[in-house]
Image (cartoon, rainbow, N blue to C red):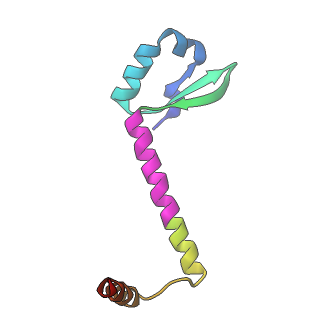
Amino acid sequence: MKLSSQIKPISYLKAHAAEVLRSLGEKGEPLVITQNGEAKAVMQDIESYEQTQETMALLKILALGTRQIEEGRVQPAGDVIKGLRKRRKAR
C-alpha cells in the first residue's frame, strides 16, 4: 500500500469530511493528515482499526511466548495436560 497517494492536509479533511469517511470505508486504506506540511495523524476505518488491534494483540502473545522460551519457563505439553486433568478431577 502506497501512503503517498493517501496524504491530505487538514483543510481538505475539514472541507470534505463526509467524502473522506466514505472513502475510508470503501477503500480500507489509511489516510495521513498533515498540518503545516507535517504528518500529524492517521485515519482509518473501524474495521481496519479492529483488525490492526487484533494483529497487535497476537504479536504481543507471540513475543511473550518467545521470551518465556528464551528464559526457560516452559513445560512439556504432556505434563501441562496431565496437570489440567488432575485439577479437573479434583473439582
Quadrant, the N terminus: top left
Q: Taking 46 as reference, is 6 left or right?
A: right
Q: In the image, is residue 47 part of the stretch drawn in magenta?
A: yes
Residue 26 drawn at (x, y percent): 33, 27
Residue 76 drawn at (x, y percent): 43, 88
Q: Which of 75 and 40 is in front in this view?
A: 75
Q: In the image, is residue 5 part of the stretch drawn in magenta?
A: no
Residue 28 drawn at (x, y percent): 38, 33
Residue at image position (36%, 85%) is 87
Magenta part of the chain = 46-61
- Image quadrant of residue 39? top right
Q: Which of 27 and 65 is in front in this view?
A: 65
Q: Magenta: predominant secondary structure element?
A: helix
Q: In this view, does 91 lie above or below 33?
A: below
Q: Is residue 13 above or below residue 45?
A: above
Residue at image position (53%, 73%) is 66
Residue at image position (43%, 51%) is 54
Q: Taking 49 as reference, is 13 left or right?
A: right
Q: Is residue 2 above or below residue 77?
A: above
The residue lying furthest to the top in this view is 15
Residue 71 drawn at (x, y percent): 61, 81
Residue at image position (49%, 53%) is 56
- Image quadrant of residue 32? top right
